[in-house]
Every structure is written in C-alpha cells, then in structure tokens.
Amino acid sequence: MATMYGQQGGYGQQQYGGGGYQQQPQYPQQTMQQGYGAQPQYQMPQQQAQQQQPAVAAPVEDKMAPVYVDTQHDDMVHDAQLDFYGTKLATCSSDRTIKIYDISGNSYTPNATLTGHNGPIYQLSWAHPKYSSSLASASFDGSVLIHRESRPGEWILVKAFHGLHDSSVNGVEFAPHEYGLVCAAASSDGRVSLMSHEDTGDWSVEYLTDSPLGVNAVSWGPYGVAEDEGGSVKSLPMRLATGGSDNGVKVWTKAEAGWEQESLEAEFGHKDWVRDVAWAPNVVPGRSVIASCSEDKTVIIWKLEDGEDDDNGKWSSMVLHTFEDPVWRVSWSITGNILAVSSGDSNVTLWKEGLDGSWTQVSQVEDVASSD
C-alpha cells in the first residue's frame, strides 16, 4: 500500500479509506501501560522497532510534485499524518499496525512499526512538539493508544486507554497545546471522550454524549484569547466540532457546568453520514471556519462571523462542491487558506477561497501509486 505527502508540507493529513462501523466485537484488554513521564528503559510490548535502513529517494520532477511512500502495509491505509515540523510521517491500516517514517526532502526512511491494537486503526494525531514526538491512535477495538519516541527509532507506550468506548473509535485529535496535553476521541457508541494528562502524572477521562447513531469525526477549535470587562486577557473556552452518522455537524463549547452544544442552524446541511470535520486555523480575527464532508458527496463550509449585527453568533453554511463519489477526509493547510479534500475516486483536490467568498480548485493529485 502506498500513501503520499506534500513536499512543501503544511497539510496535517492526506487520508484514505473509511472507517466508522457501527458494530464491534469484544477484544481482550492489555494491561501494560506507562506514565507519560516514563523513562526510555521501559520497553513497549509487541513493538517491532525497525532496523536503520537506507533512505529511499522518491523520483519527483519538480519541487511541487507529491512524494509517494511505499508503506508496506498489508491492508487498506486509513490515515497518514505529518508531524508539526513535517519531518515524520505516520500511517495506520486495517492490518492493525502503525508505521513511522523519517522524512527529509524527497526521501524517507523507515523509523518504526508500532503494534498493540486488536483491530483496524482508523486515525492518528500528533501532539504538539512541546510534548515530544507523541502519537495517538484510534481503533475499531474501542481503544486509544498514545506512543512517544524516547530515542530515535525507539517508541514507548505512554498510555493505553483500553475499553475507552463500547464500540469503534473512529477519530482522534490532540487539542491545541495551550490547553495542555488533551486528546479527544469520537466513537460509534455515540460519545466523545476527552483524555487529559494531569500535573500529578495521571490521566483523567470525561465524556460528552453526542449522537446515539455514532460519531465519526472530531476536530478542535483553535486556541484564542479575549479581553474581559476589566481589560484582562483570558483564554477562550475550549471548542469542539463533531460529525456523526445522524448526518449532523455539531459544535461544543466547554462551560463551567460541562460541555454545551452550540446552535448550528444553517441553510445547508448534509443528507448522509458525515465522515470528517476540520476546524480551520485562525486567519481572520473573530471568524470561525469548519469544513465537513459526507457520504452525500458534498463538502460544506461552516462560518461564524463575530460583530455582524444581523447574524452575530449564528453559523452560516455553503456547499463548496459536490463530488462524484463520497468524500472521506478534509484537511486545512497550516495557514488555513487551502483545503485538501480526499474523495472516493482516489483523488486529493486542493481548494482555495477567493475574495468574493467563492471556492476554486487549485490542484489535484491522483492516487496513481495504488495501481503500481
């Protein structure tokens, strides 16, 4: 199986395949866990560290061409994630493994193969480098695992959240680092779990109930600050976007009493399962932008503009494009002005918003490597 990454970097994910099944067998739980501060001498169970191998140069004709990686996975690749600096690539598959690659220009070197899940692995998320090379994985087995690279090519299991959910975990994402080491996971059991690393070294877990039909995706809102009435600057509350099998996109805000759902009544909505949501980085102050994609073959852009007298506090929506096949994943560039869309026709398209608010396709990458 092959995947690809953009040589210029900037995209958090180029993702393939699906996930989000509604039924799940019961799997035996593993008890091996390590605290986040574990020392490198602890050994991760079942981890297969790769021997150092020569870098593989991928032929490219120009600097903008994508680089295709032969992942050596034995089954469908569900996700591919570059870390913060774009120097490590992690992929996950239905073969129940995670593969890590060191990226340098046009070449890639196998770093490690991580195991531990008892089912297909649907999504990955890198933590901010403030927390070292930490990687979270979500699996059909109802668990979330967090690994960390202790030395180059050596990975330890930081925390195993076995039995976290009663059904498949379809999506996972770390929160902005300003909120601490916090991770959210979306599950087919209808809940979103929030795992937080405490100052004591322990982990706490809280849940919010989203949709009884299941949750397929979760995305954090960017960190923000605002002045209160006294002129003091304070952090804005945490926010989450979710997409579910009820065809809905929901926005949640952390309040003192718990998580509260925002009103998301807009002109356009999805007519089939929402497969992914992606909250854009802050580009324009006072504006929130979310992209969602669905099996109804559409991508919808949701916007919330502060300071508008008529629509203050109300979300608006517009259909970016209707594709020929279901759309699996959406991902923003690090600058928040380019949206990558991965659809069922094995293509990745890049879209940019014009000054008039319309969206234009600026590039397309076909998955030609899969036919080699």
Image (cartoon, rainbow, N blue to C red):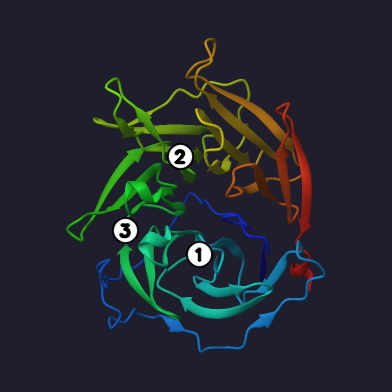
Tell which of 346 and 271 is nearer to you: 346
For this orientation, the residue located farthest to the front is 231
Callout 2 secondary element = loop
Tell which of 362 and 187 is nearer to you: 362
Q: Are marks 3 and 1 in contact (CB under 8 Å)?
A: no
Q: Indicate the position of residue 24 as horizontal and vertical percent values.
A: 44, 56
Alpha-carbon span between mark 3 and mark 1: 15 Å
Q: Indicate the position of residue 198 as horizontal and vertical percent values.
A: 22, 54
Q: Badge 1 local density, few (<14 within 10 Å), some, or many (20+)?
A: many
Residue kind at label 3, given as amino acid type:
Gly
Q: Indicate the position of residue 101 as horizontal and vertical percent values.
A: 56, 74
- Label 3 vs 1, first from the N-terminus: 1
Horizontal side of 271 relative to 252 (left or right) equals: right
Tell which of 271 and 66 is nearer to you: 66
Horizontal side of 258 relative to 224 (left or right) equals: left
Q: Quadrant of the C terminus?
A: bottom right
The circle drawn on residue 163 is: 3
The answer to whether residue 227 is seen in the rendering is yes
Q: Are marks 2 and 1 in contact (CB under 8 Å)?
A: no
Q: Quadrant of residue 141?
A: bottom left
Q: Quadrant of residue 274?
A: top right
Q: In the rendered image, which residue does mark 2 sit on?
A: 221
Horizontal side of 28 relative to 18 (left or right) equals: left
Q: Indicate the position of residue 162 as horizontal and vertical percent values.
A: 32, 62
Residue drawn at point x = 49 percent, y = 78 percent: 113
Residue drawn at point x = 71 percent, y = 68 percent: 67
Q: Quadrant of the N terminus?
A: bottom right
The answer to whether residue 140 is seen in the rendering is no
Alpha-carbon span between mark 2 and mark 3: 27 Å
Q: In the rendered image, which residue does mark 1 sit on?
A: 120
Tell which of 74 and 107 is nearer to you: 107
